[in-house]
Amino acid sequence: MTRTERAAHPHALIKDRSISKNGMDTRLPKGGAGGHNWGDLSREQYLEDAAAYDEQEDFVQQGGQPPVENVERPTTGRRTSEFSEEQLKAALELRKKAARGNEVDLGSIARSSAAVSRSPPKRDVPITTGASASIRP
């Protein structure tokens, strides 16, 4: 008799302590939420909200003011819309000359990037009322 046959023998199965004697499943399935995965995922958001509310209430009862989220944003540098037409033209010329020249200054090219990274200026387009829609031969 081989080891596998011995392990599958009915007497060996009777002695196996990992299987329940009455055939019932003894494990408790976990729901997937909470500590060590015990709990229920459907109630997780409710429990998190309730905990945050309780914490804020305790803080107010101790005499504190509830925190107000007033975040000051850092001021940014100049925007491209703040550049004058002369500055934009000069930046474009600088970029054109830098491509042709032997000595390339990467810092000045980077500073002139606003000239090419913006939309073209809005110019009024004249509308004519007597336009013909016919195709010329």
Image: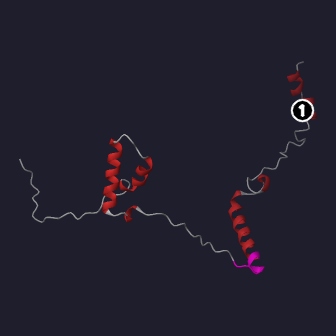
Looking at the image, which residue is at 77% across and 80% down? 61
Would residue 73 be found to the left or right of residue 93 on screen? right
Would residue 82 be found to the left or right of residue 20 on screen? left
Instruction: Tell me how many marks there are.
Output: 1
Looking at the image, which residue is at 88% across and 27% down? 7
Q: Position of residue 23 (x, y in %)?
A: 86, 42
Location of mark 1 (residue) = 13
Q: Quadrant of residue 5?
A: top right
Q: Position of residue 114 (x, y in %)?
A: 39, 56
Q: Measured along the vertical axis of the image, is residue 96 above or below residue 64?
A: above
Task: Name the outermost residue toward the front.
Answer: 103
- Asked if residue 63 is among those painted magenta in the image, a careful observer would answer yes
Quadrant showing the N terminus: top right
Question: Local crowd at mark 1 within 10 Å, few (<14), some, or many (≥20)?
Answer: some
* Kind of residue at disc 1: Leu
Looking at the image, which residue is at 75% across and 71% down? 55
* Observer-nearest of 97 and 29: 97
* Observer-nearest of 60 and 100: 100
Would residue 70 be found to the left or right of residue 34 on screen? left
Q: Measured along the vertical axis of the image, is residue 88 above or below residue 28?
A: below
Q: Measured along the vertical axis of the image, is residue 1 above or below residue 90?
A: above
* Observer-nearest of 78 and 57: 78
Looking at the image, which residue is at 69% across and 59% down? 42
Q: Position of residue 43 (x, y in %)?
A: 71, 62
Residue span colored magenta: 58-65
